[in-house]
Image: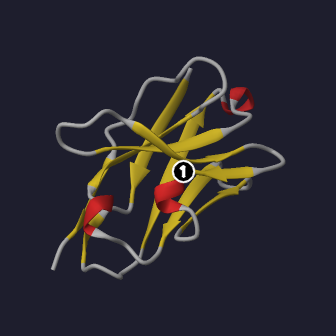
């Protein structure tokens, strides 16, 4: 089994930056890709960034502002978020995209507000 723990969220003003972290433990060998998802109040969870061994992909609303990366030595994935907008406010989760999902973590709240 794989356990995922997200962290790094908080309150930030529009235009600010945050870096989210996703720490994985357990059967790490099963992880060949990772995605960052977000869920805003009253909306469905959406995929915003995805990384595989050879590529990264981003949803249009975050393209050019968010960057997904991985530190193999720490079994940790990151989401660098720049030029944040109020519409980025959501709970952010990590999980794989290819194949069945691991149990969801608790997520980390990102609030963009002045």
Place of residue 12 in the rendered image (x, y in percent of width and height, measured from the top left)? 26, 75
Going 31% across and 38% down the picture, which residue do you hit? 106
Residue 113 position (above or below residue 92): below
Quarter of the C terminus within the rendering: bottom left
Which residue is labeled 1 in the image?
59
Going 58% across and 17% down the picture, which residue do you hit? 100
Residue 46 position (above or below residue 48): above
Q: Secondary structure at mark 1?
A: loop
- Mark 1: give few (<14), some (14-19) or many (20+) Cα within 10 Å: few
Q: Nearer the viewer, residue 84 or 11?
A: 84
The residue most toward the right is: 54
Q: Nearer the viewer, residue 91 or 107?
A: 91
The quarter of the displayed image where residue 35 is located: top right
Q: Is residue 70 left or right of residue 46?
A: right
Place of residue 23 in the rendered image (x, y in percent of width and height, measured from the top left)? 52, 47
Q: Is residue 83 left or right of residue 50?
A: left
Q: Is residue 27 left or right of residue 10?
A: right
Quarter of the N terminus within the rendering: top right
Place of residue 67 in the rendered image (x, y in percent of width and height, measured from the top left)? 59, 64
Q: Nearer the viewer, residue 59 or 111?
A: 59
Place of residue 45 in the rendered image (x, y in percent of width and height, measured from the top left)? 36, 35
Going 69% across and 32% down the picture, which residue do you hit? 31
Going 60% across and 31% down the picture, which residue do you hit? 97
């Amino acid at each position: 089994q794989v356990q995922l723990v997200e962290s790094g969220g908080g309150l930030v003003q529009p235009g600010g930056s945050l870096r989210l972290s996703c720490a994985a433990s357990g059967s790490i060998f099963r992880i060949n890709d990772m995605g960052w998802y977000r869920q805003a109040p009253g909306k469905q969870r959406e995929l915003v960034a995805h990384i595989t061994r050879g590529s990264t992909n981003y949803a249009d609303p975050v393209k050019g502002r968010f960057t997904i990366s991985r530190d193999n030595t720490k079994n940790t994935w990151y989401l660098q978020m720049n030029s944040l907008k109020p519409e980025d406010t959501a709970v952010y989760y990590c999980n794989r995209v290819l194949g069945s999902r691991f149990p969801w973590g608790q997520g980390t709240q990102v609030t963009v507000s002045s």
